[in-house]
Image (cartoon, rainbow, N blue to C red):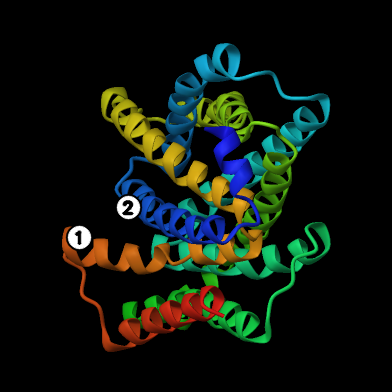
Amino acid sequence: MGEYFVNLAGTEHGERLAFILALVSALAHSIFAAINKGGIDPYLNRGAINVAYSIMAAPFALYVFPLPSPLVFQILILSYILHLGYEWLQAAAFSKGAFTLVYPIARGIGPLFTALIAISLFAEALEVSQWFGLVLLSSAVISLAYVNLQEKGLSKELKASLMPSILLAVGAGIAVALYTTVDAYGIRKTFNPFTFLAWFFFLGGFGFPFIAYMRYQKMAIKPSLPPLIKRGIIGAFIALFSFATLMLATRIGKVSEAAALRETSIIFAGIIGVIFFKEKLSSTKVTVISLIALGAILIEFH
């Protein structure tokens, strides 16, 4: 299976499959975000998810796929550090600010920085129309945060108090760009891409869960563990699927295109919000979502 994806790199069929994988990853990521939205605590949610997918990946990393080379293992360690930083920044942002404020900022910043890094790291080149689509998509995603704030009718004082969460979200967005390019580099340096994926998820259980455990220990009222475990298992399955499809898309297609297309998860998240959370989409939000879709079309169909 790994050889199949490697052989697709640089082919027309590979480009089409990368497009499909990036959109599938976007859909899965929107579901993942919806699960976190109703969670107990962003730190505990993340810790439970990491433990679950580390346990799931362990047999494959240790017994099914070959060991990573020394170079790939070094990349995995760097990826581990970057993801740990991202997970902390995201959890901290979610704990200080509303989901509808933090999520669009973090996800909107990522694609632009990813494209800029990919230019030098992977010698990727985007056409003028693609750059326009990328800027349009990222700007539209970020603007959702402003739209959400306006719709809530927050006072100027309260808006000013949200600055820490906004800065954390910006940091999370930069971390997204860094780990996306590092992971894409790592999976391209691995003979079997599934070796990289298996070890990535296996190592993920040895970082943030300890931060979550320390937070749990300090809680005056500790939440019930069974619901947290259930959420962690479901979230782990979706995280495995979402991240694996994204990484395979970056293996056989352009990193900048895959990273940008994944942020169409905002569109899917809007649909999920309407169907499952009975949220209403204003005409402004519909316009913004349409701009995100237009940006994705310009990026892909150039």
Q: Is residue 23 visible?
A: yes
Q: Which mark is on residue 277?
A: 1
Q: Would you identify the image quadrant in which residue 203 lies?
A: top right
| Rendered residue at 61%/86% (across/down) | 129
Q: Neighbour class for label 1 at 10 Å: few (<14), some, many (≥20)?
A: few
Q: Neighbour class for label 2 at 10 Å: few (<14), some, many (≥20)?
A: some
Q: Which mark is on residue 34?
A: 2
| Rendered residue at 61%/51% (across/down) | 252
Q: Amino acid at mark 1?
A: Phe
Of residue 126 and residue 111, the one placed in the foreground of this image is 126
- The x and y percentages for residue 115 are 69, 67
Q: Amino acid at mark 2?
A: Ala
Of residue 138 and residue 13, the one placed in the foreground of this image is 13
| Rendered residue at 56%/46% (across/down) | 248
- The x and y percentages for residue 235 are 37, 38
In the rendered image, the vertical position of residue 109 relative to residue 155, given as above or below: above
Q: Does 223 sit left or right of 200 as displayed?
A: left
- Quick one: SS at disc 1? loop
CA gap, disc 1 and disc 2: 9 Å
In the rendered image, the vertical position of residue 157 relative to residue 204, given as above or below: below
